[in-house]
Amino acid sequence: MIETALTRMFGLDHPILLAPMGAVSGGRLAAAVSNAGGLGFVGGGYGVAEWIRSELGIVAREAKRPWGVGFITWSITPAVLDMALAARPAAVFLSFGDPRPHAQRVHDTGARLVCQVQDLEGARLAVEARADLVVAEGTEAGGHGGRRATLPLVPAVVDAVAPIPVVAAGGIVDGRGLAAALMLGAAGVSMGTRFFASEEALAHPAVKRRLVDARADETVRTSVFDIVRGYAWPGGIDGRAVRNGFTQRWTGREDALHGAIERERPAYFAAAQAGDCDTAVVWAGEGVDLIDRIEPAADLVRRICADAELRLRSFSR
């Protein structure tokens, strides 16, 4: 068993966090990761109260070990955060924005504050918010992120926020990635794309199949899916997704997409409901090359950590 500051903080068996992927990391997936010895997070995303309340009810019933909830910081409201805190999560995960306005409310409940950052400026804000744990997310990650690569970002954040433990994220999907992150000074890893392709993830079956079939060189950083869905993300943040017909049609024509939104938005949401991966977004990180099947989340947690242990022991010899 790998013991780190992360496992000691939450009493985990394995230094793995489930990334709180909005509308994907539901209560069942979070509970499965936690019960397997990692730390599962419900992905609260943009703060849709009814969805969050329902999924928190599931994880509260099914999880036998610590679990958490995560939000997009710039979109969260105090009311939704208070509702989530009332469910007594062990941790609250905030990313993409200034965590300081919400930090005291989290600390007052006894929950741990986890801040995900994409650069050293974000790391500074996490320290000011008195984060208990910092996640350093590289641009290789699926979904939204910044421009810094995981390999140089992680040790830079480790140095910048010490003695706060750091977790690595971005392009990590197997035991090799976990072992490498530990060598960089991280206390564990946060994984999204690998758990997106799990049995418990809340995603259309066609989307999961597309993840298994996709390759890293098919992924692209883009803002077109945010535009069509009506989300105004701050500058410098876009998302990594599998290239499809929609990205080919609108990348470089974002102003035209804004002008065609009344036609394109209903068609987009209909495609997402139908699992049409040539139109709807399939968020995916560069580690997607290493995903070859859809598996139960608990099997992933245990196998990834067993592989990392084997590699670390081999290296030490």
Image (tube, rainbow, N blue to C red):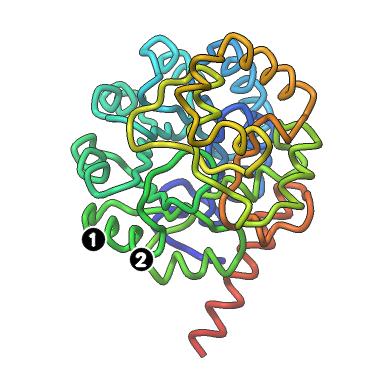
Q: Is residue 180 above or below residue 202?
A: below
Q: What residue is drawn where x is 63% and y is 22%?
A: 55
Residue 164 image offset from top left, x and y in percent: 28, 51
Occupied quadrant, residue 290: bottom right
Which residue is label 1 attached to? 159
Q: Amino acid at mark 1?
A: Asp
Residue 9 image offset from top left, x and y in percent: 41, 49
Q: Is residue 225 above or below residue 285?
A: above
Q: Nearer the viewer, residue 79 or 138?
A: 138
Q: What residue is drawn where x is 59% and y is 57%?
A: 287
Instruction: Determine contact: label 1, label 2, CB under 8 Å.
Output: yes
Task: Tell me if mark 1 has few (under 14), some (14-19) or many (20+) residues whose alpha carbon lies within 10 angstroms of its own.
Answer: few
Cα–Cα span, label 1 and label 2: 9 Å
Secondary element at tag 2:
loop
Disc marking residue 185: 2
Q: Reading the chain from its start, which is encountered first: label 1 or label 2?
A: 1
